[in-house]
Amino acid sequence: MPQEFEGLSNHGFLHESGRPDRILLFLLLVGILAFSFYPSRVQVQPLSLELKAEPLSGTAPFRVVIAAEISTNLGNDLSVQWRIGDQIQSQTGRVFTHVLTEPGVIPVLATLKGRQGSEITRSLFIRVHPSASSQKTLKSELDLATKPVKPRTRIPGSGTWDLEHFQIGKRRFLATANHENGLTNKVASRIFELVGDHLELVQEIPCVGATDIEVFSIGFKKLLAIANEGQKFSTVYSWNGAKFEPMQHLKSQAARDLEPFRIGSDHFLAVANHHDGFSPVTNSTLYRWGQDGFQPFQFLPTQGAMAFQYMKSTNGQFLVVANYSDGSTHRVDSMVFSWNGVKFEPYQALRGTGTQMLDTFSSGSENFLVVGNRYGNPNAQGLQIYRSGEEKFSLVDSMEFTNLSRVKTLKHGKQIYIAVGSSNPLNRFSLLLQWRPPGIHTVSRFSGIPLDAIDSFHQEDITYVATASSNTLSFTNTLKSGVYPLSVLLPPQERNQL
């Protein structure tokens, strides 16, 4: 046997004939090649960024230390860009220190940039109380609760889950979806006409646990749809010139939301079914308009569906569903469905914890999705802002928030605001945020004005906000449900921009 094969023979790599075992040699070669290429095949762990601050509040002046906890396998050379208030800081380390001197709620944003252009932004808010020496003369411009705000128009009733402003000709209306009155869910929803500074009742529509009301047009028809949680159907009404009359019942299961939208010449109505009587894991229904009214077009798998949101972007048309629970946990993903030209198909899952609310807004050429989670946690904070990109929806900002009752985007000119309401009846404060790229900033904090149901409209260059309370407890009568100019929710320096 040749000398170069003696070692191989001793280890069983040669047959008795002295020829190499070609199969074993091939396997050995494959193993060597796989090992040599292994480092390039390591899956890159997604960027993960969490912020922790100490302390979260204090009396001015005081020093705050904020640490960025980064989870990735890209190495330790990543830096964080810090922003406090409207000022970008020169510090780029993983620990940020700053002395806060001005009272108010101060937003802190941290942006972590990874390789190949990926980045993630997180935010938190520091409460700065005025010093004792200046407390008597200094008023926080971020807190409107100490100053009574009078609504332009009061909205009668309670237990309101949704508001819808609409216009027929030159007449302006406000519709309320009333869910209950404290004794029963068999209460009427109402249609009011805005006449000057007051509301005139036009119509009462019998409902059973109304949760949502939508007004939209198909051709020359003005339609109104109401989602009924307490019935096995929701109803579409048609305007006859004087009032809305029933036109069609649509099968639904504890319906929580309706979303009318149009793709090309087709008109659709998505119905979010929350529970089928046995389980929240059930199908929600997408209806399409035809000669005989709305007909079932597609059934979409959902888990305790709370809301639908249609969204058109440069890279497609999407229908997003807010999934609340699968019956055992609230940690379920919401789903983005993409239109493929024929039907909607799953596109991307969005991590959530009891997702309840969805909304959209545009800024420049970019489109954004607003997601509200009732039970925020580090993996899915209460308020999330996603940007629609070429390949997927990317999380660009988030905010810690619990017990969300409503999230609604408001727009006046180029200014974009996000109203966020708390559902805690013992601490019903609300926040008004403003979108200022690259993130959200707190504009004002107020109480006494409920945001359980909210809509906005423009009249004579003034943006109005209609708000109402979903609660029927007696002590909530002090909550000022009504129509307000947007300016009353803003601090003085922001009102000048309207």
Image (cartoon, rainbow, N blue to C red):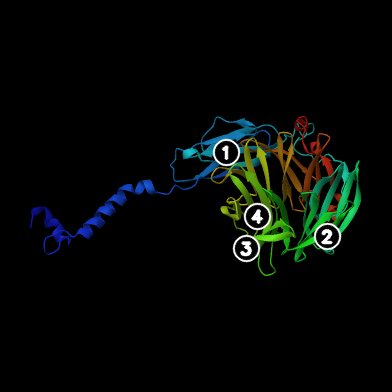
Measured from the top left, where is residue 219 in percent x and y?
A: 77, 49
The residue that disc 4 covers is 322
CA separation, marks 2 and 3?
34 Å
- Position of 435 with respect to 243 (left or right) is left
193 or 463: nearer the viewer: 193
> Is residue 282 in sight in this rendering?
yes
User: Local crowd at mark 3 within 10 Å, few (<14), some, or many (≥20)?
Assistant: many
Q: Give the tally of numbered discs.
A: 4
211 or 311: nearer the viewer: 311
- Label 4 or label 1, whichever comes before in sequence order: 1
Asked if the residue under mark 1 is in contact with the one under mark 4, i.e. CB atoms within 8 Å, the reply is no
The amino acid on which the numbered mark 4 sits, given as a three-letter code, is: Ala
Which mark is in front, 4 or 2? 2
- Position of 277 with respect to 160 (left or right) is left
User: Local crowd at mark 1 within 10 Å, few (<14), some, or many (≥20)?
Assistant: many
The amino acid on which the numbered mark 3 sits, given as a three-letter code, is: Asp
Which mark is in front, 4 or 3? 4
The residue that disc 1 covers is 110
- Position of 370 with respect to 47 (left or right) is right
326 or 476: nearer the viewer: 326
The amino acid on which the numbered mark 2 sits, given as a three-letter code, is: Pro
CA separation, marks 4 and 2?
28 Å
CA separation, marks 1 and 3?
33 Å
The residue that disc 3 covers is 326
Measured from the top left, where is residue 208 in percent x and y?
A: 81, 63
- Label 1 or label 3, whichever comes before in sequence order: 1
Q: Quadrant of the N terminus?
A: bottom left
Q: Looking at the rendering, which quadrant does residue 77 occupy?
A: top left
Which mark is in front, 1 or 3? 3
CA separation, marks 2 and 1?
52 Å
